[in-house]
Image (spheres, rainbow, N blue to C red):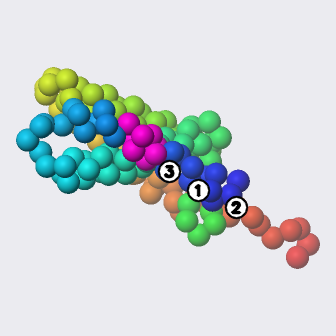
Amino acid sequence: MGRFAYYSPLWLGALLVVLLNDTLRAALPPTWSETLRWLVVVGAALAAGVQSQVLMFGLQGAFAQVLPVPIGRSIRGGGAAVTGWLLVSWVVLSGVTVLLAAEAVPQAAIGLGMLSLLTLAGAIAIYVWNLPTAVADFGTPAGE
């Protein structure tokens, strides 16, 4: 898989928000300037792109049980699976939190937002904890 394919959720998530910019800008307060409205669209596009990429990363850990680590290594097994499911949970919970906040249900949004942050913190902690056990992606062939 090349870099273009691996990072496609990042640009596809951002592109989706840009394509829906009219709906997003219409939902913003009418007193906001056009520049501020476009800044919100750009911020939402970046957030959606990052969420999409994290979702793919989490699904890779949850189902393939492998998470890439910089410097050509990978976390494999149970640590990757737990981290992956926590990342998937974070994406879902943070999305629902945004929807609850948009529907003016602040107490539920705050509670779910806290749970969302806990799942993200757990995923980061488990990922960092498993970094020392990361195995090299490509070892030297036998006999060399």
Foreground of the two, 48 or 54: 48
Secondary element at tag 1: strand
Q: Is residue 10 left or right of residue 74?
A: left
Q: Position of residue 75 (x, y in %)?
A: 59, 53
Does residue 112 show up? Answer: no
Q: Is residue 59 above or below residue 111?
A: below
Query: Which quarter of the figure is the C terminus placed in?
Result: bottom right
Q: Amino acid at mark 1?
A: Pro
Of helix, strand and loop, which one carries label 2? loop
Q: Mark 1 highlights which residue?
A: 68
Q: Residue at x 46, y 45 (%)?
A: 15
Q: Main secondary structure of the magenta part?
A: helix
Q: Helix, strand or loop at disc 3?
A: helix
Measured Cα–Cα span from mark 1 to mark 2: 9 Å
Name the mark on residue 11.
3
First in sequence, mark 1 or 2: give its number. Answer: 1
Residue at the far bottom: name it: 144
Name which residue type carries label 3: Trp
Q: Is residue 99 above or below residue 29?
A: above
The residue identified by callout 2 is 137
Q: Which residues are magenta?
A: 13-20
- Distance of mark 3 from mark 1, alpha carbons? 20 Å
Seen as rendered, the residue at the extreme right is 143
